[in-house]
Image: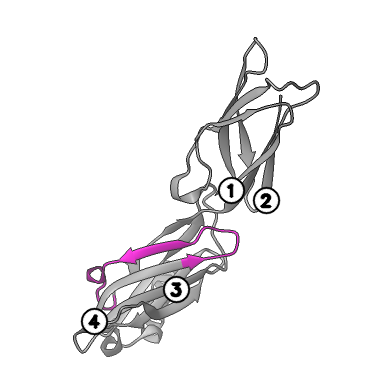
Amino acid sequence: MKHSIFSTILAISSLAFFLSGCCRTDCANTYIIEGVITESTTGLPCIGFDVELEEQVLENGVLNGFFETAGTTSTDDAGFYSIIFPRKNALEYRLNVSQEGWYDILIYIDPEDFYPDIPVQIDIESVPVGELDIHVFNDLPTNDSDKIRFRLLKNHEQYSTCDTEWKVLNGASIDTVFNCVLPGNTWMPYLYIDESNEDVIEVTDSVFCVAFEVTTLEILY
């Protein structure tokens, strides 16, 4: 009996939610896009992120050379977003996700993916920004023949300005800082080779780069 009453209430609630969104006639001219945005490494919901859907439309058979806003929203406490927007003769859609301290996300969507009254589900993983300072300097006593070679061992591709090229430093007065941006809350492996003396010292290690902060790696030789 209790199960029957609960099922009836659930059915009525679902119907009320649907009718409040749009009637059948209105929905025929309406598209819906929705999904959940989570943090890439932890899976936690991304709350309060700005989400914008843009469209490139044909008007009187002429293609506009720019994208215009079709709808905007923000993610809720569960990282959920939903945009309901008018159906148009669009050539292309794109979804923009932005939040301070996070990498911007741009996703292009084929208009053929949309059907009236049927939500298009696009779940997104967002990546926080971290920053790495690499401070390389030689300690006393120093010589003109001092030499160190250094390189990072991981490339985060579009999410990073950190490269994996060798940096070679020579001389007695080395005090240099390299800076780059990379995904936060990730490990960055590195290698350096101290060739200042006959006994070459080779070190391979990694540093954890915290999101939203500048992590400093000190290399003293």
Asked whether, in this view, residue 8 is left or right of residue 88, the answer is right
**Helix, strand or loop at disc 4?**
loop
Residue visible at 40% across and 68% down? 95
Q: CA distance from mark 1 to mark 2?
A: 8 Å
Q: Could you tell me if the residues under marks 3 and 2 are in contact, i.e. CB atoms within 8 Å?
A: no
What's the image's color scheme?
Answer: one colour
Residue visible at 50% across and 40% down? 163
Mark 3: few/some/many CA within 10 Å (<14, 14-19, 20+) = some
Of labels 3 and 2, earlier in sequence is 3
Mark 1: which amino acid? Gly
Would you name the residue on which mark 1 appears? 184
Q: Percent from the top left, x then y, of residue 10?
A: 41, 74
Q: Residue furthest left?
A: 61
Provide the residue span drawn in magenta: 97-117
**Helix, strand or loop at disc 1?**
loop
Is residue 105 in the magenta section? Answer: yes
Would you name the residue on which mark 4 appears? 89
Would you name the residue on which mark 2 appears? 213
Whether residue 160 is visible, yes or no, is yes
